[in-house]
Image: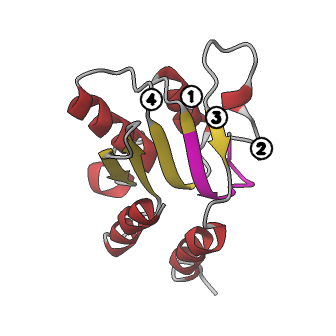
Amino acid sequence: MRAALAQARTAFAEGEVPVGAIVVDAAGTVVGAGRNDRERTGDPTGHAEIVALRAAAAALGTWRLSGCTLVVTLEPCTMCAGASVQARVDRIVYGAVDAKAGAVGSLWDVVRDRRLNHRPEVAAEVLPDECAALLIEFFATRRVR
């Protein structure tokens, strides 16, 4: 999670919503990293998880990320939860809960839907206060008072 937080801090410095993600293989080696980059790229799919999953797939030479874990500072949205299922990651570890758009147990629970052919394990709320603090700070600087 600390490596994902480092990605989130970089996103913050770049003016992006501070969400960071990494993908680690079964040995615990980081095979992909990403941070939100929607503002910089103008890409609506530029979420940290998508960026990290793409990097991991490129590094491993396959879209099947079996044996891998996605670690992300904020609970994934429906797009990112779905991408994690499609990538066949074994587990998702996330920090802050996203009560407004979370799709890994909060608002929706995409990854545990029994109708899907793959259901990653989930470890929720890992360093949640540290992950949430970065988001709170970011949005506090952008609110009109």
Say above or below: 74 vs 43.
below
Callout 1 crowding tier (Cα within 10 Å): few <14, some 14–19, many ≥20: some
Amino acid at dot 4: Gly
Q: Would you name the residue on which mark 4 appears?
A: 67
Mark 4 → mark 2, Cα distance in angstroms: 27 Å
Mark yes or no: residue 140 visible.
Answer: yes
> Which mark is in front, 4 or 2?
4
Whole-percent x and y of residue 84? 51, 31
Residue 62 horizontal/vertical position (percent):
29, 20
**Which three-letter amino acid code belongs to the residue tagged 2?**
Leu
The reply to whether callout 1 and callout 4 are in contact (CB within 8 Å) is no
Left or right of 144, for residue 5? left
C-alpha distance separating marks 4 and 3: 11 Å
Q: Quadrant of the C terminus?
A: bottom right
Q: Residue at x 33, y 69 (%)?
A: 10
Q: Secondary structure at mark 4?
A: loop
Task: Mark 4 or mark 2: name the one nearer the start of the chain.
Answer: 4
Please determine whether, in this image, residue 54 is positioned above or below residue 102: above
Disc 1 to disc 2, how far (Cα)? 14 Å
User: Crowding near pointer 2: few (<14 within 10 Å), some, many (20+)?
Assistant: some
Dot 4 surroundings within 10 Å: few (below 14), some, or many (20 or more)? some
Q: Dot 1: what SS?
A: helix
Question: Going 43% across and 52% down the picture, which residue do you hit?
Answer: 21
